[in-house]
């Protein structure tokens, strides 16, 4: 008898628990879009789902893109593109307090979904939040906090959403859209433009543009589902009191710093030309830096799972072999082949310029003065060693 009561009790509990997953007709599912922060990791904003059902007292937020610093070999896995990210869950009140504390604008779009579609999204998120399903392999362009918003709603609606072209919007590459958030002359864009290859210079499709929270918001506003607007209503639930912008160019920006370094290199080269001498330590530094940069770029291309670090034509100036030939620049007389190697480096710089002009790859703006300085220095070395 006691055993029978226990079984019945368990069944009742399980039944009651399963009932919690059935949203009421008053339930609303909305997308939250968080504005920019002032740090590089906050510069692209954030996206989340809000599930609100007053009948059951539910008001929670699910968001993707969290990570655990306690993961073994965290930084190595991050560099290799093998770091697992997590889905998170918070009460809306806590979520709101966090972003209000950091003074970041919050916008909400209530989705125009059927009861069945709402239930599918809710079930999907609840199932995804289970410990065994929480982790996923992050990809900045194809599997991040924003693309998850797109993917979940597409799955729940059986891909019945039509994303329409934004009005008066020109064609954009991934790099163009990154620059919209981090600028073209910030240290963030400088590092990104060197590390990421030509693959991000291809024109994006409408759905690919949803890798950024800002474009999730814009495309959702413009999208339809079963010939009806996807968004039922939009509102700002918090407006930043101070405009947050990462892309603001500081005084010590890359273009200025690299221009100063370039002027220094050209000045030393001019002095060497006048005195018919050669500053060996300068050549050693240039070969070391360009060679080391090349090794890092090769590692990002072939040693990691980051697909977008491949086909990187920054290797035309950051040449890994320079690291192996540092000993040559300390010699007073060099072999004939080394002069040929210097001419090869000059040709590589010209080829890089051609790639830039015809649009194969867009390079960091701050690199321009350095490329000019390298070109002048390599030309001088060819003339010097010839004499």
Image: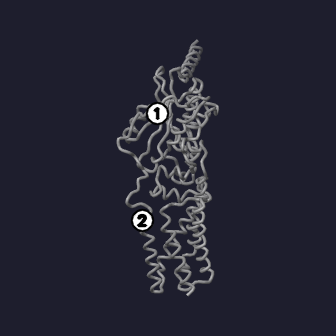
Q: Quadrant of the C terminus?
A: bottom right
Residue 156 shown left or right of residue 259 in the figure:
right
Residue at the extreme left of the image, as rendered = 241
State the residue at coordinates (58%, 35%).
Answer: 152
Q: Residue at x 57, y 54 (%)?
A: 80
Q: Residue at x 53, y 20 (%)?
A: 25
> On the image, which quarter does residue 299 sit in?
bottom right
Closer to the camera, 201 or 18? 201
Q: Nearer the viewer, residue 122 or 156?
A: 156
Question: Which residue is painted at 48% across and 24% down in the image?
Answer: 53
Q: Nearer the viewer, residue 356 or 118?
A: 356
Q: Is residue 31 left or right of residue 104?
A: right
Compare marks 2 and 1 and give the one earlier in the sequence: 1
Residue 275: x and y in percent read 45, 86
Q: Residues within 10 Å of mark 2 (few under 14, many from 20)?
A: some
Residue 242 located left or right of residue 184: left
- Classify 271 as above or below 285: below
Q: Which residue is mark 2?
A: 257
Residue assigned mark 1: 108
Horizontal relation, residue 165 to residue 109: left or right? right
Please tell me whether mark 2 sits on a helix, a strand or a loop.
helix
Q: Which label was assigned to residue 367?
A: none
How far apart are labels 2 and 1 at the CA level? 41 Å
């Amino acid at each position: 008898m006691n055993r029978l009561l226990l079984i019945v009790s368990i069944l009742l509990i399980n039944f009651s628990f399963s009932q919690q997953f059935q949203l009421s007709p008053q339930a609303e599912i909305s997308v939250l879009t968080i504005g920019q922060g002032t740090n590089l990791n906050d510069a692209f904003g954030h996206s989340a789902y809000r599930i609100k059902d007053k009948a059951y007292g539910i008001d929670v937020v699910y968001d993707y893109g969290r990570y655990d610093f306690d993961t073994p070999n965290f930084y190595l896995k991050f560099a290799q593109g093998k770091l697992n990210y997590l889905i998170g869950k918070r009460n809306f009140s806590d979520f709101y307090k966090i972003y209000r504390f950091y003074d970041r604008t919050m916008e909400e779009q209530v989705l125009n979904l059927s009861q069945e579609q709402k239930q599918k999204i809710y079930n999907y998120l609840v199932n995804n939040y289970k410990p065994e399903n929480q982790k996923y392999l992050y990809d900045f362009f194809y599997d991040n906090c924003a693309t998850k918003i797109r993917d979940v709603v597409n799955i729940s609606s059986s891909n019945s959403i039509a994303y329409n072209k934004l009005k008066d919007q020109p064609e954009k590459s991934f790099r163009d859209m990154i620059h919209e958030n981090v600028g073209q002359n910030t240290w963030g864009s400088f590092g990104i433009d060197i590390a990421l290859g030509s693959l991000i210079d291809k024109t994006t499709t409408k759905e690919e543009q949803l890798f950024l929270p800002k474009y999730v918001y814009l495309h959702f506003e413009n999208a339809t589902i079963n010939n009806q607007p996807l968004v039922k209503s939009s509102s700002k639930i918090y407006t930043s009191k101070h405009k947050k912008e990462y892309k603001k160019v500081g005084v010590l920006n890359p273009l200025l710093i690299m221009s100063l370094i370039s002027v220094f290199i050209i000045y030393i080269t001019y002095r060497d030309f006048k005195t018919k001498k050669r500053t060996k330590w300068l050549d050693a530094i240039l070969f070391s830096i360009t060679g080391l940069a090349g090794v890092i770029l090769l590692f990002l291309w072939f040693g990691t799972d980051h697909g977008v670090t491949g086909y990187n034509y920054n290797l035309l100036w950051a040449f890994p072999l320079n690291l192996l030939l540092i000993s040559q620049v300390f010699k007073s007389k060099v072999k004939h082949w080394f002069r040929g190697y210097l001419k090869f480096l000059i040709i590589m710089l010209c080829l890089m310029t051609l790639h830039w002009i015809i649009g194969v790859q867009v390079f960091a703006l701050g690199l321009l003065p350095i490329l000019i300085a390298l070109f002048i220095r390599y030309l001088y070395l060819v003339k010097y060693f010839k004499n």
